[in-house]
Image (spheres, rainbow, N blue to C red):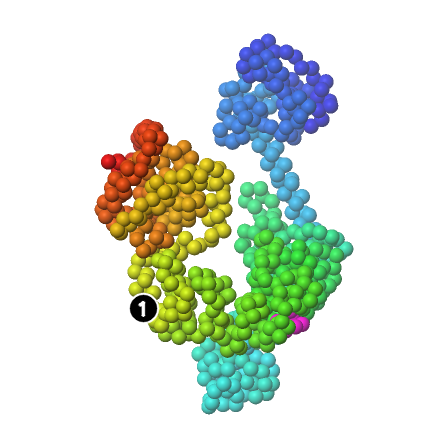
Amino acid sequence: MKWKSLEAVEIISPKKKKGLIAKAHKYKNCLVIDVYRDGGHYGRYAMDLDTGEYEFRKGKVTHKWKMATVIEGKSDYWQYKPNVSNQLVWDTEKDRITATKSLGGGDFGYKICSKEEDWLRNKRERSLELKYDRIRELMGRIPPEPEDGMKEKILDDQEIIFFFLDKTKKLCKCPICREEFPRKDLINVYGEGKAKHNDWVECPNCSREGLLKIRRNHMEQYGQILLLQNIDKEVSVARRFKWTVYSRYEYRTCVLGETIRIMMYRPHGYKIYYSQDGEHRNWYTKLCIPEWNDSNPCNQRVAECSLYPEGISEALKGTDYESLIRAFEAMANEGIVIDYNAAMAVGAKERGLGNTLEYLLKGQFTQLLKDTIKNCWTYREMYIGRLDLDGKTIEEVFRIKDRQKINRIRQMNGGEMVMEWMKYSDEQNDRISQDTLQWLTDHHITVTEMGKALLPITQKVSAEKFRNYLEKQSRHYAGNVKDTLEHWGDYLSMMVATDQKLDDELFYKPKNLKARHDALVNNRQKLEAVKRMNEDPEEREEEAKAMRDKFPEAEVILQDVREKYSYQGEEYIIRIPKDLVEIVEEGYALHHCGGSSDRYFNRICNRETYIGFCRKVGEENIPFYTIEFEPDGTIRQNRSYYDEEPDIDTIRGFLKEWQREIKKRLNRKDLEYARKSAVLREQNLQELEAKRNTFVLEKLKEDFMAAG
């Protein structure tokens, strides 16, 4: 809008002084409406009557506000459209006529809103049309793909080829040399006698190996390939193709279909375009959407793929991905299939990734290379694996001091799991035999899993003894080593929770693990509580720290009342937590809100209620019941696993016994706190009744036990 020229329209004070008043002016091809609120000038709305362009100026600030937004502050079309005419009050009849005639007559609110929408729609469509033209121009600059070369590479890279039998001719044909020969001439690679369906065979002519298919006359293989091409000095492109290899007796061919194009700009930046499966016309805008667009309605996806070896250096030079050139060229020539998209996403940030990948490939660490790419987090553009990408030497990269251990990783083509065990061996000076290393890898047992299971014991268990014990005990678990390890960890956790000795091998490595485990872990809820108690201790500490910062007096008060309210009976004990961490752990272990809700810690600080733990004698470290009680021993709530109430009748008998005992220990100040607590309790119940929270009310009534 040309506001400079519109300043020629004089601002005239309205005759009406109250409410929302408007005065209209027609100036050249513009409709100008001055808006007043309670006599004061609120702002000026202007619309170009030829195009429908509109703006609102308030003081010296210009806004893209619609008329209804100016009047009501609303932006939903269906809400505000009818209200413009109803709420806008014209200063004079002349103002109303001027505004209405300028818009062609009819209802002013409807007309101005429609004209605003038309302008916005036309603006969007013009913007889209220009965008589509830019995309078409950009895509037109991309050079053609070397289709024949790509198909040849895809066909050559297939590890599995198929020999088919023509049952009419009684002949087989090699898909590589295209020679026909009798079935009996096929060489059975891993068997004896005549080759059968799905046998691995060798062509007698070209010696190429593949699978024999007798019961099928066709096979399809699927995958993706990445092509990197330079466009000009400003941009290059990474083109992703899906491919399908069709194998028949008569022929073997490859079909390509492009799905994604990533434009890589120099020196920085990228833009992704997705195939739309051809140009098509949008039914609403009537615009022709190009074959490539930045939206993804066809749900095109990336996956592990091979890389076409030509044009890599020219495409990546000068972009964010220049550090990956040598690694990509080496991997493309070797036919390595990985997620190159993840490597590019992380390589743009982690400049050491390219050198590391190149070293792993040349050093024949093929599996570790693939695991390294799997640890490249595309979304966050970060590497989350165990290698030091910025290491200067092989020892620094692997974080292993002993070169022989690094050589062992190469010899068995190990991945991250093997490297983790070698690093453990290096740090703990624990020799691991090749047989044990292979066994641990075959059963997918990590160092972390071993450490988590053996956390309760202080003695060092070597990897050899660890393997031997698991292998021996797995006989009782149908050979399932993972289940054996889980039960071993459960058994050790329960031993610690029940204060039983673990200082001898006889205790932490029982002769029959399954029998000892089943005898000790007779209650799944107990086991789950113990496991959750030991889960994420750092996180529980953080939660407790947050509560400690909010309620610094809580721990001091708990220490002050600890001796007064602690009690041991014949079957159960009541103990007061020594710090807030214990309360958080207890709530997490029993799945209730006692450790995560501010109100319980606030009540402790106000000495309205305290928290106590009810445990079984002999199982003092296993969470059982959490008790919230008032200073005189009146019990407000008792919560166990998932708010259940196991052995509740026995527990209530013990709690009455506890109430009688602590009554003797109370002083005048405790009783004063108790009277205030009772008043607050009644207020809380009244609030719940007012909110009609019947479920909580019923639970509180069930749990309530007044002190005798």
Residue sitting nearer the eye, 593 or 562: 562
**Nearer to me, 233 or 407:** 407
Q: Is residue 362 magenta?
A: yes
Check the picture and name the quadrant holding the C terminus: top left
Q: Picture coordinates of residue 125 (x, y %)?
A: 62, 40
**Residue depicted at 65% across the width and 24% down the height:** 57
Q: Is residue 399 above or below residue 127?
A: below
Query: Mark 1: which secondary structure?
Result: helix
Q: Quadrant of the N terminus?
A: top right
Q: Quadrant of residue 686?
A: top left
Q: Amino acid at mark 1?
A: Ala
- In screen coordinates, is 563 left or right of 65? left
Residue occupying the point 28% across, 37% down: 663
The stretch of residues the image draws in magenta is 360-365
| 21 within the magenta span | no
Q: Name which residue lies at 57% across and 62% down.
A: 374
Instruction: Identify which residue is drawn at 63% across, 53% down.
Output: 272
Task: Determine whether, in the image, residue 705 is placed left or right of residue 551.
Answer: left
Q: Residue furthest right?
A: 233
Which residue has dot 1 on it? 515
Q: Quadrant of residue 238?
A: bottom right
Residue 146 lies, with reference to residue 115, above or below; the image says below
